[in-house]
Image: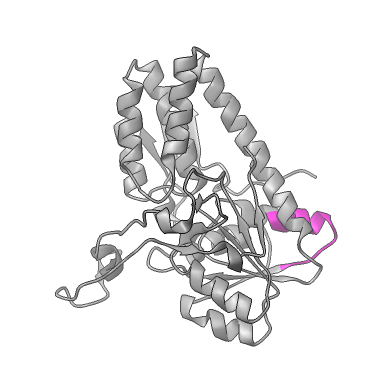
Amino acid sequence: MTMKFSPLFWPIQLKGNVIYILDETKLPQRLVYLKAKNYLEACRAIKQMKTRAVGQVLLVMYAFLLSKRQNKNLAKVAKAINATRPTLSFKFLTDMVLSWEKGGAPLEKSILGFLAMLKTKRIEQAREAAKLLKDGDVVLTHCNISGLMPLIAEFAKEQGKKISFYVTETRPYLQGSRLTAWEIQRAGFDVTIITDNMVAYLLSLGRVTKVIVGADHLTLNGDIANKIGTYQIAVVARYFKIPFYVICPPASKLKSGKEIKIEIRPDNELKIYQGLHLAPKEVKAYYPAFDVTPAKLITRHIHLGV
């Protein structure tokens, strides 16, 4: 099989001493890349959600690699990265890089080796997920798993299975409709967008046979944090006895989801979209970016294994 990768599968590139970041906030209208020439610009891109999911992991590693070339204090770099977004466990990555540096191994070789392994493991995750599907399955997904959903569909097709997708909008950033639906359609597979509040009705009609989502954080007991709205989908899937699969990162050191710090985004990200005010200026807004789905609602974790 000649694998076809979505631009979102590996959305960050290091060319020379410049990091090129696929600006996910511009999709699907424009496929453009931002430039980061130091770790502070990389941190800014993470805070502004220019990249997320696996893109953040790649950007963190390339920011360290670039900082090493620029003779920056890596402990200071790690502190800045750890302060960007609280729910994804960047400390796992920063501690790993600092341990490589302390151990005396060539840092650039260690980072590039890790990224090569990450790419291989992500492909294996997609292949494992495809094995769980049957011919004719209709998959519901929420948010975006950085290029894995079209790759899952490619592997399923190779296995003689035809599958189709329902994708939630994933408000307020619309990662589902802007990113996931775009990359699935771009890869040539059938995809239908629904709003976030249609899930229970859709599942009641029997139109969905599997649910596959990603996760930004996995705890030791199997709880996961993912984009806000995942928890309610898991509850509804359990009610209708629909398998709920999660593509996971490595587990953190936290014991359970109760210990995960949930990121609260600024009010205006909920109230304003592309300059359009969706609510009166005086109205308050509450935007937790993630929720926690307990392990008991998850049919199977598809682990990364790095």
Say left or right for 46 vs 92. left
- Can you see residue 191? yes
Say left or right for 296 vs 287. right
Q: Is residue 217 magenta?
A: no
> Of 299 and 55, which appears nearest the observer?
299
Image point 31% across, 41% down: which residue? 83
Where's residue 298, x and y in %?
62, 64
Tell me: residue 300, above or below residue 18: below
Residue with the most extreme left position: 282
Where's residue 157, x and y in %?
79, 58
Residue with the most extreme right position: 160
Tell me: residue 299, above or below residue 236: above
The C terminus sits in image quarter = top right
> Of 50 and 197, which appears nearest the observer?
197
Image point 47% across, 35% down: which residue? 93
Say left or right for 229 vs 190. left
Say left or right for 74 vs 191. left
Q: Which residues are magenta?
A: 152-163
The N terminus sits in image quarter = top right
Where's residue 252, x and y in %?
50, 44
Image point 36% across, 44% down: which residue? 46
> Of 110 and 5, which appears nearest the observer?
110
Image point 35% across, 36% down: which residue? 81
Tell me: residue 303, above or below residue 272: above
Label tally: 0
> Of 118 and 195, which appears nearest the observer?
118
Q: Where, by quadrant of the figure, is residue 206 drawn?
A: bottom right
Q: Where, by quadrant of the figure, is residue 260 drawn?
A: bottom left
Q: Is residue 160 magenta?
A: yes
- Can you see residue 37? no
Where's residue 255, x and y in %?
49, 50
